[in-house]
């Protein structure tokens, strides 16, 4: 596997993780409105929000790098921030996480797929290094945050 393939695989993994985390948190809160303040659900919400903030922030930074390279990006650059905004404190957690997951599994992921298609045509490793913002530290950090979400999952729920 060459370096570009490795970078693309890591970006795809991060996209899958974003969708899985948002979906798992939404699933945990469906029908749990009466017990939404339990320690397990609170820990899951906190770990999920931290993971999403990390990864969505990284994708936003990548978009800025791509734009600096002259890549014309599809509209919707604020979708990640919009998704995070839905899970703000004080919101109805079940509805908020459902809306967040819906946005990340829909419009945000479609935009990411379009950007991935645009980037796939670029054979320059130096460009990929510039905009991917992937290194050993970033991979380790994303895995650690994802691990926190996995550890916080209620019994019977998995990340898919």
Image: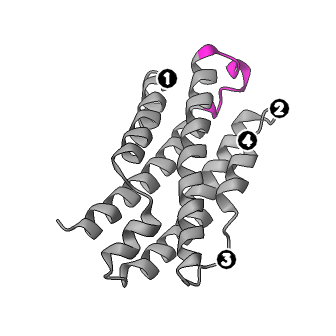
Q: Give how far apart the Cα atoms at labels 4 and 3 are.
A: 26 Å
56 or 21, which lies in front?
A: 56
- Residue 34 colored in magenta in the image: yes
Which mark, residue 90? 2
Q: Nearer the viewer, mark 2 or mark 3?
A: 3
| Residue extent of the magenta highlight | 29-39
Question: For the residues marked 1 and 3, what is the alpha-carbon distance in whole angstroms?
Answer: 36 Å
Mark number for residue 95? Answer: 4
Q: Residue 68: give x, y in percent of width and height.
A: 58, 77
Residue 32 painted magenta:
yes
Q: Earlier in the sequence, mark 4 or mark 3?
A: 3
Taking the spot 75% from the left edge, 47% from the top edge, the residue there is 85
Cβ atoms at labels 1 and 3 below 8 Å apart: no
- Mark 2 or mark 4, whichever is nearer to me: 2
Task: Give SS at disc 3.
Answer: loop
- Residue in view at x 44 percent, y 42 percent: 142
Q: Residue at x 41, y 31 (%)?
A: 147
Label 4 SS: helix
Label whose residue precedes the other's in the sequence (1 or 2)? 2
Examine the rendered structure and indicate whether residue 37 appears above or below residue 112: above
């Amino acid at each position: 596997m060459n370096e570009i393939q490795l970078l693309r695989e890591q970006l795809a993994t991060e996209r899958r993780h974003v969708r899985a985390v948002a979906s798992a948190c939404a699933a945990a809160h469906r029908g749990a409105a009466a017990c939404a303040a339990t320690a397990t659900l609170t820990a899951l919400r906190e770990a999920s929000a931290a993971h999403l903030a990390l990864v969505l922030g990284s994708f936003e930074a990548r978009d800025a790098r791509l734009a600096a390279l002259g890549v014309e990006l599809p509209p919707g650059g604020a979708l990640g921030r919009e998704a995070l905004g839905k899970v703000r404190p004080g919101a109805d957690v079940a509805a908020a996480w459902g809306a967040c997951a819906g946005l990340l599994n829909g419009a945000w992921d479609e935009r990411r797929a379009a950007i991935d298609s645009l980037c796939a045509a670029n054979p320059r490793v130096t460009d990929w290094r510039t905009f991917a913002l992937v290194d050993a530290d970033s991979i380790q950090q994303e895995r650690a945050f994802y691990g926190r979400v996995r550890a916080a999952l209620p019994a019977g729920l998995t990340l898919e």
